[in-house]
Image: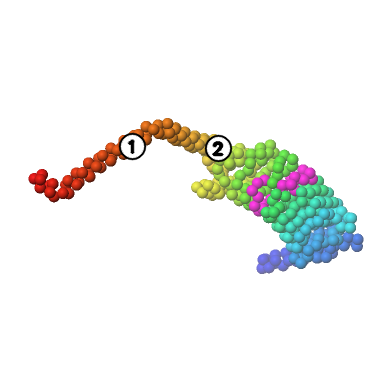
Amino acid sequence: MWILHYFYHSKRHQWCLYFALLLSPVWSDDACPLSCVCARDSGTVNCLPDPEETELPADIPEWTSTLILKGRNISTLPRGAFTFNGTELLMMATLSLPFNGIQVVEPYAFLGLTRLHLLDLSHNQLRFISARAFHGMPELRSLYLNYSIMPSAMAQLSYALNAESLRNLHRLELAGNRLKFIPLERLDIYSLHALVLINNSIESIDKENITSLYQQRRVRVYLSLNPFRCSCELEAFYYWLKNSSQCQDAGRLLCSEPEPKRGFPVEKLRSEDVDCMNENLEAVSYVFLGIVLALIGVVFLMVLYLNRGGIKRWLNNIREACRDQMEVYHYRYEQDSDPRLANVAV
């Protein structure tokens, strides 16, 4: 009975909340867009999913501080996409646009959103990102691009993230994008506190980024579900992982190559496993051995060339000796095979 009682009251609470949003005070000059639920008190506009809708709502109220728009079919975010009839949404602090099929982000797409703190573009299909896509948002603190970057936009992403307006970025999420490297040229130009790179295709992190991570002690990095190649190339990253606490999921980092180390925790590797010096010495020793053998071969060929006359006479003498010996064997064979000679001998 208590379960039914809880279910009844919870459902009643949901309906009350829904009607409260619908009946919240709305002025005639900033009416709520169709298929959206507006709450003036909290500044929230939540638009319902509509796969057939291909345009952004054109009448977002000026007082909106949080806009949630997902489940639509919006292929392009053009310049000033959130500026309507010259009106800028100066109060906008949170913009959530997941699952909208967005493929193109044009220059200055978010122009006018000068107070935006959080932008979520996760779960889209970004094929083109302008180098100036994120310009005009000096207050942006959190940028979510999880499961959104298509292969054609990989190179463009680095230029887009180096925007001047992202200098105050605190949290950057790039999970599930098949990235092979950190798409940030220099970490020290940001105010990053969290960098999420889980479930990508990162095999190692280069020394320049490791140096930046050492310098930016406040940054917390998440790297699980990446196929790390546990070889000499991982040396700098391995020692950073051992000596720093910046990687929050260090215990979940596993080797994918070479085969004997597949599934082995990266932080439990031995220093010899990633020692570049030993690998380099071994490689040098093989090269040196090859050079020595080559020199021996050259010397041997030179000796043969310089003594070619004597070697020729020696070979001729051997041939003549063999010929004389074969003639003796042939003569003895003829005598043994003639029966008359055999009788004379008796």
Of the residues under marks 2 and 1, which one precedes in the sequence?
Answer: 2
Magenta run includes residue 162: yes
Residue situated furthest right in the rendering: 29
Instruction: Inspect the image, locate mark 2, and give the three-letter code of the amino acid beneath it.
Output: Cys
Q: Is residue 340 visible?
A: yes
Q: Quadrant of the C terminus?
A: top left
Under circle 2, the secondary element is: helix
Q: Which residue is drawn at 17% across and 46% down?
A: 335
The residue pinned by badge 1 equals 316
Under circle 1, the secondary element is: helix
- Indicate the position of residue 25 as horizontal and vertical percent values: 87, 61
Q: Residue at x 76, y 49 (%)?
A: 131
The residue pinned by badge 2 equals 276
Residue 13 higher or lower than 130, as above or below? below
Tell me where the magenta segment starts and ends, as one range.
Answer: 157-182
Magenta run includes residue 307: no
**Is 254 positioned to the left or the right of 78 in the image?**
left
- Indicate the position of residue 81 as horizontal and vertical percent values: 82, 56
